[in-house]
Image (cartoon, rainbow, N blue to C red):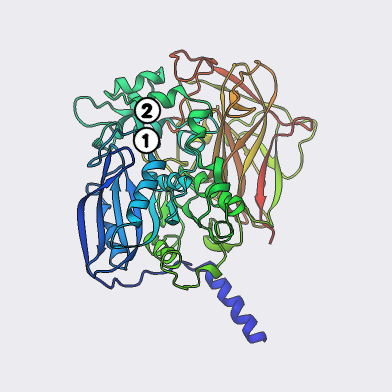
Amino acid sequence: MMTRLLTLLAAAALATAQSPFPSPYPPTNEIEIDNMTAVPMRDGVKLYADVYRPAKAGRYPVIVCRTPYSTERFPSAYQAGVFFSRRGYVFVFQDTRGRFESEGKWEPFRDDIEDGYDTIEWAAKQPWSNGKVGMQGGSYLGHVQWRAAMAKPPSLVTIFPNVASTSLYHDWITLNGGWRLAFNFGWGAVRMESRVMQNTGPNTITDGPRGQHFDTLQWHLPLTEMPKRAGRGPQFYQDWLKHPDYDAYWKKINVEEMFDQIGIPVHTAGGWFDIFSQGTLRGYAGVSAKGATADARKLSRMVIGPWGHGPSRKYGELDFGEHANMNGLAVQLAWFDRRLKGIDNGLDNQPPVTMFVMGKNVWRREREYPLARTQYRKMYLSGGGRANTAAGDGRLSWDAPTADSKPDKYRYDPDNPVPSHGGNNCCGAPTVAGPVDQTPIEARGDVLVYTSQFLEDEVEIAGPVKLVLHASSDAPDTDFVAKLIDVYPDGRSFNMAEGIVRARYREGLDRPKLLTPGQVYEFEIDMVGTAVAFQKGHRIRVDITSSHFPQFDRNPNTGEPFGTTANVRVANQTIHHTPQRPSHLVLPVIPK
């Protein structure tokens, strides 16, 4: 009995220290590719797909992938189709409506419910199909899977959205009301304006005479004029600008409004530093808690690693070790083998959540997310009123502030914003993303820095993080930005999570309300989530400021309607941390 127990314990430790992911088995068959296959939609529009299928006649399970990036021109276009079809699947790779070979008008997000449904049911009825259909793909290719699942096509068995959004408003267009300028403009207004994706250089929005250097263009106000300055003017981008609040325009395409109607198992995957990490986390948590069927609730899965917009070993300035990376196609293959082929590969017996804990740099399997054993603990801000820069007196402690803790002040000038330096971004204008040493940012006087004592023991957190901030401003509207920082013994400080709140949305993203200048308000800054073990000898830190540019647009501090003004003004900000107004972090501490 003791020998067996020791064996099990050793196996468990090995599972966390090494990669928990399978390797793909070798391909077993030749394939044929049917190019430019017309798929009719209910309104008569034809969408075109390349169909990868085993050369041997028969009926096979089908994987549908729908892309706005071209089935032939995107760098990795052929990889998934060849991979799955050589292993016994038919892979239907389709251009979405209005993109490349497909007919119709391109408008992101809006037609993907009906088009997804029609494509899935078409695939299920083809002579090479056994009637079981799954969906695969990442980013926009993952988003369309959620949209199709909302339509509940009867032949859809499962989806595997990777690095994908679940709420376009909450984790694509904005974060807590902060407009994702670099992504929205670079991806939406410029690259995805027309049927064919625009060519881009490393530092320019577009090549050719209409191109402008983003370092100049990003500063232009009002925001509504930026597309014109770049020679781009898609109507859908103007529509986004016209709907800065969470209203009916966004609600009808929000999967999170109807998790309770998703009746199929869902496997999400993503990275702690991905721009859509919220979608990965909320997608799994939503379906596993609220799904319409027992299978949806019990069989759904999630993998989240130390990555950005796709698996890697190193991201930003940190190397997370040889086991940090993941072969995404191999993980998807195991999932589809179980769900579409019924192969008993042991997947259903594994804990549903696989997460990477940074700092320790280990993988951990868990039964749920957020973790049931989490202890949500507060770390309080305090100081003598000079928390400006890392050399200031800002303190972060498990102890509540005392009466002698004095408020901290700084000036936010939209003409001199804090530059984006690492963080959760991708795919738009050039920005540095991921965990990056924050010491250059922490030398600025408009950044407040609150730091703990050196840790005498490890502190591990895993789950949602938020900052409760008691603050006032002399402006009618402004932003507050927070970063959770891991400070190394040598002084380097790496961002582990971040969040922003636009002050007018303090009572709800659908209920904007301007500030009364000078009045103290309580703001909640959702920092999404992370998993990191702060090591002995490290320190925990939170940075607070009012800009993160160009990842987010600059709040002009004027209170005027979003995107319409060229006027800016300086905002004088005050952060309070007293016994009566205890500003604090809420950390998801995992007990030993």
Identify the element where label 2 is drawn: helix
Determine whether, in the image, residue 306 is placed left or right of residue 220: right
Position of residue 580 relative to residue 269, above or below, is above
* Residue drawn at 39 percent across, 58 percent down: 133
* Residue drawn at 45 percent across, 14 percent down: 565
Q: How many angstroms separate mark 2 from mark 1 (CA)? A: 8 Å
Residues at circles 2 and 1 in contact by the CB criterion of under 8 Å:
yes
| Residue at the disc numbered 1 | 108
Q: x and y percent of residue 314 in the render?
A: 41, 54
- Which quadrant: the C terminus? bottom right
The numbered dot on residue 18 is: none
Q: x and y percent of residue 405 in the render?
A: 75, 31
Mark 1 residue type: Pro
| Residue at the disc numbered 2 | 236
Determine whether, in the image, residue 118 is placed left or right of residue 421: left
Q: In terms of sequence position, does the residue under pointer 2 or pointer 1 come before the other?
A: 1
As rendered, which of 18 and 69 lies closer to the eye?
69
Few, some or many C-alpha atoms within 10 Å of disc 2 (few <14, some 14-19, many ≥20)? Answer: some
Q: x and y percent of residue 436 in the render?
A: 46, 44
Determine whether, in the image, residue 81 is placed left or right of residue 181: left
